[in-house]
Image (cartoon, grey):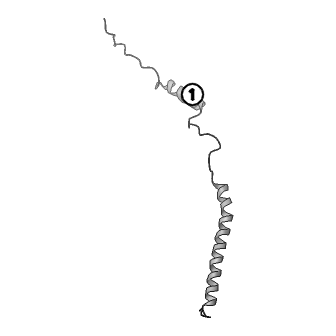
């Protein structure tokens, strides 16, 4: 038998549970489209290797050649080849 003093308490508890459930479902329903709109998901184009532009690579190569850093090795005048 239910006590008359507990009936309003149980009703408020049922109402609180229903409100929390409904609020959670509503928040979930509203936030899922926002999350889907912000999440990248997958790349639309295939990944490509990271590389410097061709003009930049040529400019660096030209600068290194002009500075003598990439110049071919020079043998000293004293160097002789072995005689066979």
Q: Quadrant of residue 49?
A: top right
State the image coordinates of residue 7 (x, y, percent, origin top left). Answer: 63, 90
Q: Residue furthest top?
A: 84
41 in relation to 75, above or below: below
Q: In this rendered view, identify the residue nearer to me: 83 or 36.
A: 36
Q: Quadrant of residue 58?
A: top right
Q: Which image quadrant: the N terminus?
A: bottom right
Question: What is the crowding at mark 1: few (fewer than 14 residues within 10 Å), some, or many (at least 20)?
Answer: few
Residue to which mark 1 is pinned: 58
Who's the residue at 65% across and 44% down the image?
44
Who's the residue at 41% across and 17% down the image?
74
Q: Secondary structure at mark 1?
A: helix
Total residue callouts: 1
60 in relation to 21, above or below: above
Q: Residue furthest bottom?
A: 4
State the image coordinates of residue 47 (x, y, percent, origin top left). Answer: 59, 40
Who's the residue at 59% across and 33% down the image?
53
35 in relation to 41, above or below: below
State the image coordinates of residue 11 (x, y, percent, origin top left). Answer: 64, 85
State the image coordinates of residue 82 (x, y, percent, origin top left). Answer: 31, 9
Q: Which image quadrant: the C terminus?
A: top left
Q: In this rendered view, identify the residue nearer to me: 33 or 7.
A: 7
Who's the residue at 59% across and 37% down the image?
48
């Amino acid at each position: 038998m239910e006590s008359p003093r507990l009936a309003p308490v149980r009703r408020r508890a049922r109402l609180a549970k229903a409100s929390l459930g409904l609020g959670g479902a509503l928040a979930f329903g509203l936030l899922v489209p926002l999350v889907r709109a912000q999440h990248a998901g997958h790349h639309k184009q295939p990944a490509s290797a990271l590389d410097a532009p061709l003009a930049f690579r040529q400019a660096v190569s030209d600068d290194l050649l002009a500075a003598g850093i990439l110049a071919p090795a020079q043998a000293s005048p004293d160097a002789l080849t072995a005689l066979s």
